[in-house]
Amino acid sequence: MESAPFPHDLVQLQAAWNRTYDALAAPRPAANTALRRRLLMLSTRLWWHPFWSGPGRMPAARVELRSQARALDAQR
């Protein structure tokens, strides 16, 4: 089953979430509080993005979104 293509802004949002999570997971992160707040804000924006209100949006699509965002970061 092929999922609908993700909007560019949603992929960018997931990539930002991934980078923030990775920075927070590093040993002794600088700006710990700012990173936690940013992760919470990005999580909220990801969860409530209009894309997810469309028909046929399955949980597997969120996994695919994370995969695409990681691939995007790997290209950089």
Image (cartoon, grey):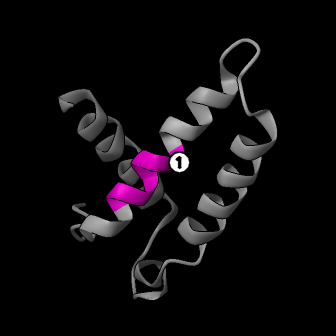
Looking at the rendered image, the quarter that the C terminus falls into is top left
Looking at the rendered image, the quarter that the N terminus falls into is bottom left
Q: Is 39 left or right of 6, judged from the image as shown?
A: right
Residue at the outermost right position? 33
Identify the secondary structure beneath mark 1.
helix
Return the x and y of residue 33 as percentages of the image width and height: 81, 41
Q: Quadrant of residue 45?
A: bottom right
Q: Is residue 68 magenta?
A: no
Prevailing SS of the magenta stretch: helix
Identify the residue at image location x=45%, y=85%. Answer: 50
Return the x and y of residue 8 as percentages of the image width and height: 25, 66
Instruction: Write down the residue under mark 1.
Output: 17
38 lies above or below 35: below
Residue at the outermost top position? 27
Residue closest to the eye, 58 or 76: 76
25 lies above or below 19: above
Q: Quadrant of residue 9?
A: bottom left
Identify the residue at image location x=40%, y=88%. Answer: 55
Residue 6 appears anywhere in the view: no
Q: Is 5 left or right of 12, judged from the image as shown?
A: left
Identify the residue at image location x=78%, y=33%. Answer: 32
Instruction: Report the magenta residues as a range.
Output: 11-17
